Image (tube, rainbow, N blue to C red):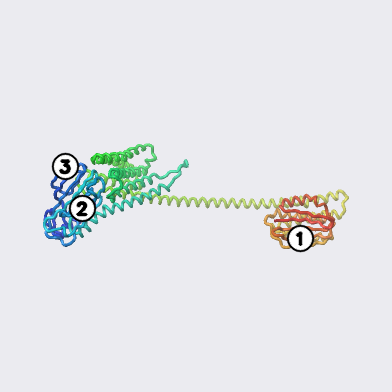
């Protein structure tokens, strides 16, 4: 309606400025004035019957001839006071299905093939035809338009305007073209964009219910389907030659129209939450009936060349849609929320547009009017985008709240873990101290205690010399000192261990008359020797040196340490009487196995070697 009003207003302004005063096209006009051609004669041919009579445009073929196909020849006379000097043009808001235009018996333009029915349809866009100046003449002129009318394709001829090219093209044609053709392109693009967004949301927004089943949001699916159906339906306005035959194409366009209406209703169906209520499942059946009925009655109307079948069914469809929209509006009033209000507003506007189009396009004799409902999809697209923005805003707020709550919970857990860790660390320190005490006590029991016990038995027997008793007591004292030294030994530092051993035992060796030789090079730390292993190594070396003091009768004791490649080598060498090396002392073997060291013994009179290797 708005494009029509703009066109008429522009035409009226031109006519007022030219002083035409609304005169009939038969009256004389100056060459600078556009002329609106309203009256003339028409010759129709239907089913082989030809009739001629006067005509007053606009001419609605389907209304006047019940949708029967045929031909119409229009002769529209007009008079000029003088031959125009400026270029002229013809503006036809609507004509179809296919037609040709002549001026004073000279062919100007052909749109489609008049010899073939149900092919192209050029009634979808307004027409502008330039007029060569040589064809216009002073006095009587005749504009002839011959058209072929196909059934149920809104064939006919609107009022025609002829006049100077500048006002006719820029003020009338370009405005109508922008609304009908360019508008259709923009609407199609808008619907595709909104449909793509809705489809992407439907594919990506997956929720998991309490039973662990994934579920997608239904409103996005129906919104996408609605927008895609409407994109195809509106795109028909820019396709004069459809890729399918008219029968199939007409059914497809009607199905897209019904699919759009039903998808929009299903969109509202899910917005209200009815989709989750078993009591409302029956609503799906009338919606399915709308699609099936539209396809059936469209095919019947096209097959029988009787558009009234489709007109009647559209009335039933409008009643069903009005009933649903009314129920939806009532539910919205009872429990209003922003989303339902947006959809209800768009639905009410669309119903109003649909009723207007049905009355004007299907029932009135007016021709050249444009459907309004094509623009209603914009309201649904805007409503959908607003709903998506609101939901994402709410989800963002909820996510921020969830993140804050999660951060607080994590901080609380960290505080709890820190407190627990502190408790465990304190318990570990207590346990370590306890274990150290136990270790010292065990070492004293196994080492010092056993030597003291031996000294007591020696005294009780009365057969031990004072020298043997003194050696036993000295061993006990040395082992006690070494146990105390082991507390401070760095893990893996064999050099520090040997130095402590030398410090404790060298005076005793000197007192026993044994020469002590020290041949210790710098050795790499052994990472796997922890505090416990270092004590075991200390006791092993003490055992080897103690055996030299007590049994070897040696005069020289030599300690060697060095690196052979990546291996640390330790040797305790004496020049005593030797022993049977095949009989490895049990204490040495057990401690070497505990350390994971390679133990090698070599003994003969004059040379005994105890060797340890660490990788």
Element assignment for label 2: strand
Tell me, for residue 560, which label it has, or none. 1
**Crowding near the residue tagged with mark 1, few <14, some 14–19, many ≥20 C-alpha atoms within 10 Å:** some
Please identify the quadrant where the C terminus is shown.
bottom right
Q: Is residue 427 left or right of residue 90?
A: right
Q: Which residue is mark 3?
A: 49
- Give the number of the disc on residue 92: 2
Q: CA distance from mark 2 to mark 1?
A: 117 Å
Number of marks in the rendered image: 3
Splitting the image into 4 quarters, where does residue 497 fall?
A: bottom right
Q: Examine the rendering and report whether any part of residue 16 can be seen.
A: no
Residue at image position (23%, 43%) is: 151
At 72% from the left and 62% from the top, the residue drawn is 522
Do the residues bearing badges 2 and 1 touch, measured as CB atoms within 8 Å?
no
Mark carried by residue 111:
none
Q: Secondary structure at mark 3?
A: strand
x and y percentages locating residue 382 in the rendered image: 33, 51
Q: Nearer the viewer, residue 298 or 324?
A: 298
Q: Local crowd at mark 2 within 10 Å, few (<14), some, or many (≥20)?
A: many
Which tag, 3 or 1, sits closer to the chain's start? 3
Q: Which SS class for mark 1?
A: strand
The answer, for residue 493, to whether it is visible in the render is: yes
């Amino acid at each position: 309606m708005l494009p029509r009003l703009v066109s008429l207003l522009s035409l009226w302004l031109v006519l007022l400025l030219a002083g035409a005063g609304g005169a009939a096209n038969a009256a004389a006009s100056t060459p600078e004035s556009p002329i609106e051609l309203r009256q003339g004669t028409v010759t129709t041919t239907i089913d082989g019957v030809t009739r001629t009579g006067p005509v007053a445009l606009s001419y609605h073929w389907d209304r006047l001839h019940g949708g029967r196909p045929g031909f119409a020849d229009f002769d529209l006379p007009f008079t000029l006071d003088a031959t125009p000097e400026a270029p002229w043009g013809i503006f036809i808001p609507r004509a179809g299905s296919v037609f040709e235009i002549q001026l004073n018996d000279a062919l100007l333009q052909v749109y489609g093939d008049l010899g073939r029915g149900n092919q192209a349809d050029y009634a979808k866009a307004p027409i502008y035809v330039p007029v060569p100046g040589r064809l216009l003449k002073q006095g009587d002129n005749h504009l002839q338009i011959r058209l072929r009318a196909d059934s149920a394709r809104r064939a006919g001829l609107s009022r025609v305007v002829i006049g100077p090219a500048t006002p006719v093209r820029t003020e009338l044609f370009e405005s109508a073209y922008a609304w009908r053709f360019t508008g259709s392109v923009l609407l199609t693009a808008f619907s595709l964009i909104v449909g793509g967004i809705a489809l992407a949301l439907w594919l990506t927004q997956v929720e998991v219910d309490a039973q662990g089943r994934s579920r997608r949001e239904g409103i996005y699916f129906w919104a996408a389907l609605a927008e895609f159906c409407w994109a195809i339906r509106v795109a028909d306005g820019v396709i004069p030659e459809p890729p399918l035959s008219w029968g199939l194409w007409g059914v497809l366009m009607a199905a897209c129209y019904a699919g759009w209406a039903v998808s929009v209703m299903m969109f509202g169906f899910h917005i209200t939450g009815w989709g989750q209520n078993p009591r409302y499942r029956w609503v799906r059946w009338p919606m399915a009936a709308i699609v099936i009925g539209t396809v059936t009655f469209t095919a019947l109307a096209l097959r029988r060349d009787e558009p009234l079948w489709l007109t009647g069914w559209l009335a039933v469809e409008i009643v069903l849609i009005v009933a649903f929209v009314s129920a939806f509006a009532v539910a919205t009033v009872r429990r209003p929320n922003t989303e339902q209000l947006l959809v209800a507003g768009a639905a009410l506007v669309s119903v109003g547009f649909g009723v207007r189009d049905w009355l004007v396009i299907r029932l009135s004799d007016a021709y050249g009017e444009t459907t309004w409902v094509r623009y209603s999809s914009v309201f649904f697209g805007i409503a959908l985008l607003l709903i998506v923005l609101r939901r994402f805003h709410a989800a963002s707020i909820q996510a921020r709240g969830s993140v804050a709550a999660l951060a607080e919970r994590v901080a609380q857990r960290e505080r709890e873990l820190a407190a627990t860790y502190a408790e465990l660390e304190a318990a570990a320190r207590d346990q370590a101290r306890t274990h150290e005490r136990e270790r010292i006590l065990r070492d004293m029991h196994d080492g010092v205690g056993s030597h003291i016990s031996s000294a007591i038995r020696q005294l009780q027997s009365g057969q031990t010399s004072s020298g043997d008793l003194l050696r036993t007591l000295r061993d006990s004292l040395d082992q006690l000192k070494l146990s105390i030294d082991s507390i401070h030994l760095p893990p893996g530092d064999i050099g520090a261990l040997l130095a402590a051993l030398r410090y404790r035992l060298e005076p005793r060796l000197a007192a026993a008359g044994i020469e002590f030789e020290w041949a210790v090079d710098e050795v790499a730390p052994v990472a796997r020797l922890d505090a416990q292993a270092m004590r075991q190594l200390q006791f092993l070396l003490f055992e080897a040196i103690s055996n030299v003091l007590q049994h070897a009768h040696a005069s020289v004791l030599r300690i060697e340490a060095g690196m052979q490649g990546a291996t640390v080598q330790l040797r305790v060498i004496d020049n005593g009487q030797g022993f049977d090396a095949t009989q490895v002392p049990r204490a040495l073997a057990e401690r070497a196995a505990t350390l994971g060291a390679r133990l090698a013994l070599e003994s003969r009179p004059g040379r005994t070697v105890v060797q340890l290797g660490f990788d």
